[in-house]
Image (spheres, grey):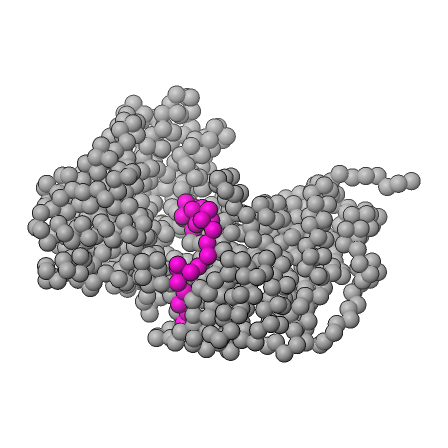
């Protein structure tokens, strides 16, 4: 007798019994299948090529679940892959934990799982183990996802803010603010003539190429929540050096700029999900830039500024379009909840 | 041009902007850092949240505490501290809803017929027409659980009050582009005529602001104050007469309290008698009294251009955007907030 087909998640799907088994075997495994996962063991066994590993985790609560340019599934893979990538690692394996609200349509879950599978494949990582929990209606908002990731550090690569010196260049691989503005405008039901699209993408291909083909990269970080402003402030504080960026060099999609102005946001403080900030020596900056520009995720890459000696306290300063100067502060982080 | 003017006048020139959007634009574009030292920009009473008197905030908080009321407010008001907290701290009780427009507030009234919806109506001439439309709509549709707590302000009476103060140091006004779209730039003529101060309307791009400042300098050097709009693509002398008509139908000017400026004659808009059933002041028996600011807070002096925010002892120490004491630190358009965010000062959050 074939099991009864449900069109929505029930609490019992997380109960560890027959329904849980059905959820995993009928819905999750076929999408994500690989040899390690198929064992359904309590732990995944991995054969890594080196013991220089990077390990990270992130949770995803984005609202809405589906947005222009991505969805929570794609985000859950890219976000964790990118955290490994910017640490100088080649991502190998991810875990996947789903916290599902009772009542979620299976159709939506299938779409999210398909997206997870496709993004993992494109990022060259496998989902090797996972967990599924269900909570009663109202205790979560449709679905929350946690992924943890493990990656192997590229040979000879050792990134850190302590390596940064005055004169190093700051490079970004493309337009800033697209993800946050796509989400927020969709949430507020605002439509722009040329639609805003999240930049959600897996950066591992680009970062590995940068690290393998150049030798001057000091540090990398993906400017997610808090945007470029938060990332540069973190770098400046850790390196105990100041940073100057040029407004005219910072790539921003005109629609995103208009949206940010209209909604009262500073585009520098808006989240990105497919961008990397690279700090590279002055000698290697041009090579980095050309690698970026020849990569599908870096066509709009720019050198946006440089690291400079600190006058009093480490500060990030913007040289504005008219040649004025102003501070770029660490954003407060209250403006945009549930952006990823 | 600006440098030459400063040199020629041989004294400090103080130009006040009276629009929060100008304040933010000036800081964000770093204009202050490229102006000659002799030209000082003062941020005047241009941010709606900042100028709203403390007693009004306390009244809103009091209403928020009532079980039969829902407070509908624009987002930037919810963090202003008052007696016993802020609307944000009361928000969890569902008695406070953030709305994006007066229309949203009216919808709340339709959706919650058992509750009294009080719309926190603050703002200058730019936001008043939307409030007026909501009131007229409520009247037409017979919605009787919708109330307006109007603290809508008029810009010109505040400018007059500033210039009438003995200790004022304002040489000219950079006039607000947004307000002028509604009122027309003609409303500033009385400032030029009565107080002999240049009034120049400017847009919000950095270059438009600089052009406005250059025009002010030209007038000061020539010794002939004029009324001029540098924002002619959008602003006319008469403004939006249709919007003015709607406002006049619903509201009439009354004396009102301002933070820092005190009571100013005919500076606040009150609902006309015809619409008194929507007037929260009347329906909830609220009498306005002058408010008292938090101890040590110098928002009032900041709003009058008498001090720069860092001269306040609370600035960036016990008053920060995360934990504000005064209204000028709460609103993103406030002078203290802009100064804190964009100004190069050692005295700021680390």
Give the image quarter of residue B146. top left
* In this rendering, position of residue A312 left or right of residue A8: left
* In this rendering, position of residue A97 left or right of residue B60: right
Can residue B114 be seen? Answer: no
**Picture layout, residue B54 above or below residue B38:** above
Q: Depth check: B316 or A69 in front?
A: A69
Quadrant of the frame with the N terminus of chain A: top right
Look at 15% across and 47% down and name the residue there: B198
Give the image quarter of residue B70. top left
Q: Depth check: A229 or B266 in front?
A: A229
Look at 21% across and 52% down and name the residue there: B213
Residue B330, how many percent across, how many down? Answer: 36, 53
Look at 58% across and 45% down and name the residue there: A68
Q: Depth check: B329 or A112 in front?
A: A112
Q: Is residue A151 magenta?
A: no
Please identify the residue farthest to the left as the structure is shown. B223
Residue A150, how many percent across, how many down? Answer: 69, 67
Q: Depth check: A156 or A331 in front?
A: A156
**Picture layout, residue B79 above or below residue B183:** below
Can residue A289 be seen? Answer: yes
Residue B216, how many percent across, how many down? Answer: 17, 50
Give the image quarter of residue A245. bottom left
Look at 38% across and 65% down and name the residue there: A317
Range of magenta residues: A241-265
* In this rendering, position of residue B101 left or right of residue A215: left
**Picture layout, residue B256 above or below residue B242:** below
Residue B166, how many percent across, how many down? Answer: 11, 52
């Amino acid at each position: 007798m074939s099991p009864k087909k449900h069109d929505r998640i029930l609490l019992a799907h997380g109960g560890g019994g027959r329904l849980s088994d059905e959820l995993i075997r009928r819905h999750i495994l076929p999408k994500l299948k690989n040899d390690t996962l198929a064992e359904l063991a309590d732990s995944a066994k991995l054969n890594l090529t080196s013991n220089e590993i990077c390990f990270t985790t992130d949770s995803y609560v984005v609202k809405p679940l589906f947005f222009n340019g991505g969805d929570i599934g794609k985000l859950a893979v890219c976000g964790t892959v990118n955290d490994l990538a910017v640490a100088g690692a080649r991502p190998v394996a991810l875990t996947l934990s789903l916290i599902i609200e009772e009542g979620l349509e299976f159709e939506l879950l299938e779409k999210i799982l398909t997206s997870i599978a496709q993004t993992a494949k494109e990022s060259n990582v496998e989902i090797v183990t996972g967990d599924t929990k269900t909570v009663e209606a109202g205790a979560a908002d449709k679905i929350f996802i946690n992924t943890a990731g493990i990656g192997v550090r590229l040979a000879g690569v050792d990134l850190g803010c302590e390596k940064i010196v005055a004169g190093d260049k700051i490079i970004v691989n493309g337009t800033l603010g697209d993800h946050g503005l796509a989400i927020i405008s969709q949430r507020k039901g605002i439509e722009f003539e040329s639609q805003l699209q999240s930049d959600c993408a897996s950066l591992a291909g680009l970062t590995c190429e940068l690290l393998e083909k150049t030798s001057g990269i000091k540090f990398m970080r993906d400017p997610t929540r808090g945007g470029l402003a938060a990332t540069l402030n973190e770098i400046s504080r850790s390196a105990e050096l100041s940073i100057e960026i040029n407004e005219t060099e910072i790539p921003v999609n005109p629609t995103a700029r208009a949206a940010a102005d209209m909604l009262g946001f500073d585009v520098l403080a808006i989240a990105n999900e497919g961008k990397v900030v690279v700090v590279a020596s002055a000698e290697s900056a041009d090579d980095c830039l050309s690698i970026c520009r020849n990569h599908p995720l870096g066509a709009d890459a720019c050198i946006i500024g440089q690291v400079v000696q600190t006058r009093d306290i480490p500060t990030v300063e913007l040289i504005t379009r008219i040649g004025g100067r102003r501070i770029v502060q660490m954003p407060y982080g209250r403006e945009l909840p549930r952006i990823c | 041009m600006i440098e030459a003017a400063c040199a020629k006048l041989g004294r400090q020139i103080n130009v006040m902007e009276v629009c929060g959007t100008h304040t933010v634009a000036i800081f964000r574009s770093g204009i202050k850092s490229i102006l000659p030292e002799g030209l000082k920009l003062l941020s005047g009473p241009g941010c709606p949240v900042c100028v709203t008197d403390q007693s009004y905030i306390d009244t809103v908080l009091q209403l928020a505490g009532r079980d039969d009321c829902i407070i509908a407010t624009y987002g930037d008001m919810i963090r202003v501290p008052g007696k016993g907290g802020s609307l944000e701290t009361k928000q969890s009780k569902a008695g406070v809803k953030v709305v994006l427009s007066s229309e949203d507030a009216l919808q709340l009234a339709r959706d919650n017929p058992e509750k009294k919806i009080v719309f926190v109506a603050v703002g200058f001439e730019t936001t008043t027409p939307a409030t007026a439309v909501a009131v007229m709509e409520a009247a037409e549709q017979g919605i009787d659980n919708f109330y307006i707590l109007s603290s809508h302000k008029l810009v010109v009476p505040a400018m007059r009050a500033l210039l009438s103060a003995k200790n004022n140091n304002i040489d000219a006004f950079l006039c607000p582009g947004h307000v002028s779209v509604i009122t027309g730039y003609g409303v500033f003529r009385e400032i030029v005529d009565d107080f002999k101060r240049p009034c120049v309307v400017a847009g919000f791009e950095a270059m438009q602001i600089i052009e406005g400042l250059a025009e002010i300098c030209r007038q000061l050097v020539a010794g002939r104050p004029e009324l001029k709009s540098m924002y002619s693509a959008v602003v006319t002398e008469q403004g939006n007469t249709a919007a003015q008509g709607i406002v006049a139908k619903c509201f009439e000017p009354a004396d009102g309290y301002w933070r820092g400026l005190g009571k100013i004659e005919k500076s606040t808009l009150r609902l006309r008698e015809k619409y008194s059933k929507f007037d929260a002041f009347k329906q909830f028996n609220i009498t306005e009294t002058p408010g008292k600011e938090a101890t040590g807070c110098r928002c009032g002096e900041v709003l009058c251009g008498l001090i720069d925010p860092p001269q306040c002892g609370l600035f960036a120490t016990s008053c920060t955007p995360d934990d504000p004491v005064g209204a000028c630190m709460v609103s993103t358009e406030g002078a203290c907030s802009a100064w804190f965010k964009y100004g190069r000062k050692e005295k700021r959050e680390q």
